[in-house]
Amino acid sequence: MTNPEKLSIQGRHLLNRRRFLGVAGLSTTGLALTSLLQSDGLLADEIKTVGGKTPIRPLINADKPYLSRQPHFETAAKQVLVIYLPGAVSHIDTFDYKPSLYKMHGKKPPGLPAVTFEGPSGNIAKPFWEFRARGESGKMVSDLLPHLAKHVDDFCFIHSMSTKTSAHPQGENFINSGFTMEGFPSFGAWVTYALGSENQDLPAFVAINDPRGLARSGKNNFGSGFLPAAFQGTDFSAKSPPNNLRRPASLSKASDRQTVDLLQRLNARHLGKYPGDADLAGRIASYELAGRMQMSVPDVMDLSGETQQTLEAYGVEGGSELRGQYARNCILARRLLEKGVRVVQLFNGSDPSGGNGITNWDSHSNIKKTHAMQAEIMDQPTAALFADLKQRGMLDNTLVVWASEFGRMPFLQANGTGRDHNPGAFTCFLAGAGVKSGHSYGESDEFGFKAAKDEVSVYDFNATLLHLMGLDHERLTFYHNGLERRLTDVHGHVVKDVLA
């Protein structure tokens, strides 16, 4: 037998018979208690979401976080284009036709509020543009958007959207990240966290900002929140390419390639010393992607190969300078989707100095002039982008989302020329993979003031978008601060009637 004096104190304790029997007895008691709790159904089960489902957290290779991953279930949509219009588009002046507004024009019926977000309310005002029946479906659309109106038979409108805030920053946060507060992952970040990307030489998620700048909530609209930073949107536009990718003129292409190869070998050697360090692996993956983008981004941003017919269709020339810049952004969006980028978020509108209809759709005064100005920028290029995707067969696997943060009131403000914020009802539309065509879902009331039939909350909207991407919104989670966090928080139902 080994000399007990050479054993450690812990070793001598293990050889003590009384201690062994005591530990064994307590262990047996613990096993018995576990068995009893299990038989009574009181033993804690595996982690569950609030809805009682088992979370699905994607298995992510820290060395290659952008690798394509399988969805929760098979679906037609493999990519998504989100066209986001900050400032709140007036639904009753675009897609939500309300005959009662004509009947009550200039009057103030009972039941409508005397004061709204920006102050006293005025009288009911009919649409500032005439509505006409469009397409084979006969969908009523105003003359404000004549180019998009040509495609209504391909769109699926949701007229009963509602939100829980009437402030722009919170409204943008809510529809783009599922929470009114900052610091939560955006829709695009959730999708790329779950699915990765088909192209390893470009970001999985690209945010194309408006030529005038960022929207009110800035990068929170495409941020990663508490998800790994690899899944945040990379923002650039046709006007403003990514920073720091251009090779210095003094460095040859061959020397640059040799430098990148050397860095890869050094990074691999360094990572080998710290196996399992996900943060280090993620940083290296980010740097390596930046290196690959030095060659991939100039190629995807080079529009010189586009035909004159394409440039004319998008409206690159012949309109305002802003329309031309936004049109180039639309072409860039198509080129990114062609390259396999998973999520492209295209912004139409910014907020560098308060908006108020000049830089976005927030028309508190002179709505006829300001909405017309924004429509001139957005309508033709957006319609051309949709037509281009359709002509190329890309709508078979691309989901298109057109959205704003809330709507506008059916009555004028006290100034008599603008419409105030309306969180009670607004319109968004979907198109492409997995969505019904030529369909309208839900209704607002007779004035477009409140959602009246089949109300769709922002939670429901985001749950439906995730479903269309093959993801269960109740099971796609990330454990953060003791909670299984979701894009839809603890709410949301898939709107099945809009699914093809």
Image (tube, helix red, strand yellow):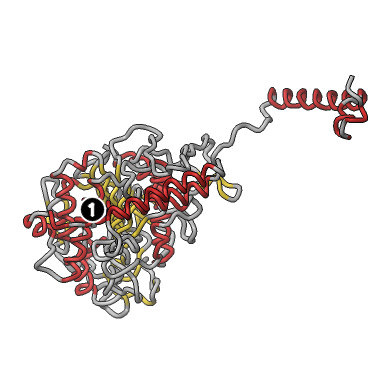
Q: Is residue 138 visible?
A: yes
- Quadrant housing residue 447: bottom left
Q: Quadrant of residue 46?
A: top right
State the residue in front, 307 or 55.
307
Q: How far from the left and from the top, in percent, is residue 300? A: 23, 53
Specify whether 2 is left or right of 419. right
In the picture, measured across the screen, residue 411 lies left or right of residue 493, that is left
Q: Secondary structure at mark 1?
A: helix
Answer few, some or many: residues within 10 Å of disc 1's Cα (few below 14, many 20 plus, some between 14 and 19).
Answer: some
Q: Is residue 489 depicted above or below 374 in this figure?
A: above
Q: Which percent across, then down, holds residue 299?
A: 22, 53
Q: Residue furthest bottom?
A: 415
Q: Which residue: 43% across, 44% down?
A: 65
Answer above or below: position of 117 versus 463.
below
Closest to the observer: 250 or 243? Answer: 250
Rendered position, 399 above or below 73: below
Residue farthest to the top, as pictured: 1
State which quarter of the image contains the N terminus: top right
Question: Which residue: 37% across, 60% down?
Answer: 424
Q: Which residue is mark 1?
A: 300
Q: The C terminus is located in which quarter?
A: top left
Q: Is residue 109 left or right of residue 312?
A: right
Label 1 is placed on what type of residue? Val
Observer-nearest residue: 109 or 80? 80
Picture residue at 30% right of the left edge, 52% below the top = 344
Nearer to us in this view, 6 or 189:
6
How many numbered badges does the structure rendering display?
A: 1
Query: Could you tell me residue 290's position as x and y percent?
Result: 36, 54
Residue 428 visible somewhere in the drawing: no
Question: Eyeballing the image, is 101 above or below 149?
Answer: below
Image coords of residue 244 (percent x, y): 35, 63
